[in-house]
Amino acid sequence: MGNFPCHFSKEEYCMTRLSKVLAGLVAVILIYFLSHLAWMAMGLDGWTSRPPLWDPAAHTLDGIHFARAFRHFSPAEFFVQIHNSGMWPPAIPLFQSPFQLLFGENYVVARNWTAWMAIPAVLIVFLAGIVSHRRFGLLVGTVAASLLAVSPHFHEYMIQEMLEVPGVFFCTLTLFFYMRFLSEQKIADWQRTCLAGIVLFFCKFNYAVIVMFPIVVCELMYRRDFRALIASGVWRFARDIRWKSPFLAFVVLYTVFLIYVHKVGISTEVFGQRVLIQRALGNPTYLLLAIILLRNYLFNRQEFTSYLKNIWNAPEPSRSLLRFDILPALIWLCYPVFFTIFFIFMFSEKTRFNSFWSMETLTFYPGALVNAYAPHPLLGGLTVLSLLGMLVFFKRLPLVTRFIVALTTFNIALTILHPNYQIRYLMTSVPMLYLVTGLAIAHVWERLSQRTGARLDKVILFLSPCIAASLLLIFPASRDHLQKSFLAYTQSERATELFSAICKESHLTNLNNVVGFSNYTAPSSIALQCYQDYPEMKREQMPTTTARQGFAGEPSGAAIVSAKRIDRFFVVDYSQLGFDVGRLQEAPLLAGIKSALPGDGYEAVEILNQGAGGYRLTVYRKKVGAGASGAH
């Protein structure tokens, strides 16, 4: 073998060096294209002057609040933001916060960060493709990364302060480590997989489910020792349960009670007062868990300690999974608010109104893959057909390919079955689908080249940069498409003027309320404008809902006004816009608040009237000496 590594022939070693050079060339092509795309996005009209809408504004605000906590060296501010991270966990805002500290605490920095995150997101897809196939990995990575780079829907999320683009990066990073583990069986790669998996959990809960669950299933299917370990643990647990004990009967009855409360609810009268119990998640569940843990600690301490030691010292792959994934997730869910919100988030509202078997429902996501994500329907059709073809030949595929095909199928099926329907929910599945497309092409090429040996390998290596350049040149990003999408996903100039008027009043007082937030007047959007206009404005001064100001569960709008705790009520009149703004937040309270405000310790002043097609804003200022009418 001479000076060459013992596991490579001389020709294979040269091919490896050549593949690295060509892989670097493909990476340069992708980086150049995406950098040009990011600069194009940053030059869109309104990029620095139009605040984002609801969810993008909320994500941006989370990053700003973490940055402010770090800038003020304030643990209190930090933990307040952690407390408010139940619906959307804190990882991505935390990653973004250093950039807010360096370049400014505003939505423009968050917008720029998301646009430039497209580069590592596409590059990690490229690297994942390389490790997915030992012979033609460069082809797989080139095809998958190039398809993602030219995806119009991916471009749309580059210009939004959403979780999708960084989510693609972290999901694919986890897959990259796991595919390396499948190929090389190095424990370090498994540990990196588990560490990346918990980052996924703290990016967005469902990201961890759609990636780590199939990984665990794959390990169970292909590792006999893992199955044996799980089976022995379950058997020991079943053996140690005292099946006839009164305590077990209590646990069963309590659990049945919780299920009944959650599904049916309880309504009764106590001392003439109506008592309604409708929620079992949260404190009742925590009480049961606390009773179980306390009883075992007091009466079965030796067994309890033995279980903990066995779990902590379990062999791989269980050890890393338990230490790096399950334990941190359980610690997070120990906080009652996070536990409750986790289940609300995972089983969110239904937006699919047609029958599941209707043609509109059945074609919704396939149509999105063909028409929205792909730059041309033929390419979209090719990706869908590639997945179907790989499923037909599933049993003949190598392990890594089978895993990617099964993972992609699981993700798309889960998205289709979920009652909440939005095209963006496919975003993290699309890179997987494009990896399947690249693998399908690689396996077909491999089949054709079985008789020619390494000669066609050289051809495919040299073709990879050409494939990347061709796709990027044939399907360039459209500035018009980006501009149109950007305007649709951001607040208008008139809304921005409205927000500035609200902020001008709000920064003078402590408690400020907007009566009837709509889809066009999001609290987070207003807060971002306030931070833009008044950088040192305090978080508690931001205009928000009555629920966040101590009136959660209050059914009477008039009672909220008469309490006189709120310093400013902002009443937004949408009637001049010329269209229906849809459902207003806290709608049941609005009539009572509006009718009680005139003459009840508040002075009305119209501070903005944009005329036809615009907003009208009236502020009700608490009169001097009105004061609060006591604690609420």
Image (cartoon, rainbow, N blue to C red):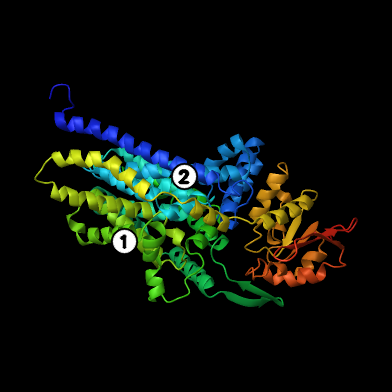
Horizontal side, residue 512 vs residue 276: left or right: right
How many neighbours does mark 1 have within 10 angstroms: few (below 14), some (14-19), or many (20 or more)? some
Which residue position is annotated with label 2? 37
**283 or 560: nearer the viewer:** 560
- Count the numbered circles shown: 2
Residue at the image position 37 percent from the left and 36 percent from the top: 28
Q: Three-letter amino acid code at disc 1?
A: Gly
Asked which secondary structure carries label 2, the reply is: helix
**460 or 227: nearer the viewer:** 460
- Checking the image for residue 484, the label placed there is none
| Residue 526 can be seen in this image | yes
**303 or 34: nearer the viewer:** 34
- Quarter of the rendering occupied by the C terminus: bottom right
Which residue position is annotated with label 1? 381
**502 or 132: nearer the viewer:** 502
Q: Position of residue 84 (x, y in %)?
A: 60, 51
Q: Three-letter amino acid code at disc 2?
A: Leu
How many neighbours does mark 2 have within 10 angstroms: few (below 14), some (14-19), or many (20 or more)? many
Look at the picture and state if 131 lies above or below 547.
Answer: above
Residue at the image position 75 percent from the left and 69 percent from the top: 557
Horizontal side, residue 461 vs residue 611: left or right: left
